Amino acid sequence: MAKSDSVIIIPTYNEKENIEKMIRTLLFLEHSFDVLIVDDGSPDGTAAIVKRLMAEYPDRVFIIERSGKMGLGTAYIAGFKWALQHGYEYIFEMDADFSHNPDDVPRLYEACAKDGYDLSVGSRYVTGVTVVNWPMGRVLMSYFASKYVRFITGLPVYDTTAGFNCYKRQVLETIGLDSIRFKGYAFQIEMKFTTHKCGFSIKEVPVIFVNRVLGESKMNGSIFSEAFFGVIKLKWNSFFKKYPQKK
């Protein structure tokens, strides 16, 4: 089998209920997608499950093991660097808990590979609000947080905190991964903002986001606090920063 041009990066911490089903589902999509798990020392045995699948699919499933919880942003940066080193052209971000539907992965891929966009975003808000099983308070907080980010930054993206994304490798090679500072969900905002400032094109692909059924949510108040205050800092710093431009 020819090497895939795409890899899906999934950060994990205690995802034993979901990870095997997610990996197997992704491997059997029509287009060939490889899977990279970045596990932050899950005590529930998530990494052991992944390693068993690696033995079954040695050329398609991979893992980076880290010693403990070091933040979502650092997990993705580690995954991005690995993906670039291994020659992938399309590099995805995705959750393990099926809040992101694997059937939407090919749609994000096509937006970049066929339609020519540099970043495709699985968007909950580009066509209204498409979120299932979230408490109303959390829906409103997330929705208005994205509106707040758009207002402060001028970023032309409706779902600024979306964690379901596909980047072309040129984006990740250009933006300077070591310059990305945020570690929580503000990381997603900073990545999209920097991508936009560097002159890359962004396409929002409407998706339905379903709250996790199995496992525990990693969301907490400090995540939203970082995003709220971090956006102001991000915009302020942008006045003094020169962004490398798409070639």
Image (cartoon, helix red, strand yellow):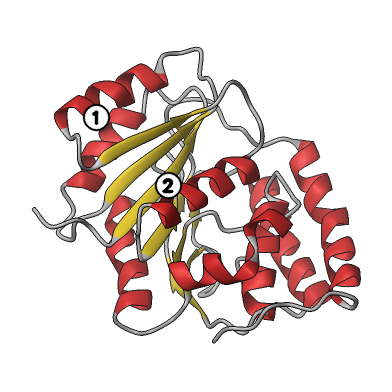
On screen, residue 103 versus residue 241, left or right, reads left
Q: Position of residue 138 (x, y in %)?
A: 67, 47
Q: Amino acid at mark 2?
A: Ile
Rate crowding at label 2 as few (under 14), some (14 to 19) or many (20 or more) other CA atoms within 10 Å.
Answer: many
Give the quarter of the image for residue 98.
top left
- Residue at the extreme front of the image, as rendered: 85
Above or below: residue 226 compared with residue 104: above
The structure residue drawn at horizontal position 50% and vertical position 44%, both measured from the top left corner, is: 133
Q: Nearer the viewer, residue 128 or 13?
A: 13
Q: Position of residue 58 (x, y in %)?
A: 19, 34
Which is more N-terminal, label 2 or label 1? 2
The structure residue drawn at horizontal position 78% and vertical position 53%, both measured from the top left corner, is: 227
Marks 1 and 2 in Cβ contact (< 8 Å): no
The residue indicated by pointer 2 is 9
Find the distance from the CA under tag 1 to the CA under tag 2.
Answer: 15 Å
The structure residue drawn at horizontal position 54% and vertical position 87%, both measured from the top left corner, is: 247
Q: Position of residue 119 (x, y in %)?
A: 49, 72
**Which element carries disc 2, helix, strand or loop?**
strand
Give the quarter of the image for residue 169.
bottom left
Above or below: residue 51 compared with residue 74: above
Above or below: residue 60 compared with residue 198: above
Q: Position of residue 140 (x, y in %)?
A: 70, 56
Q: Nearer the viewer, residue 190 or 100?
A: 190
Disc marking residue 210: none
Q: Amino acid at mark 1?
A: Met
**Which element carries disc 1, helix, strand or loop?**
helix
The residue indicated by pointer 1 is 54
The structure residue drawn at horizontal position 37% and vertical position 41%, both measured from the top left corner, is: 36
Above or below: residue 25 compared with residue 242: above
On screen, residue 110 versus residue 95, left or right, reads left
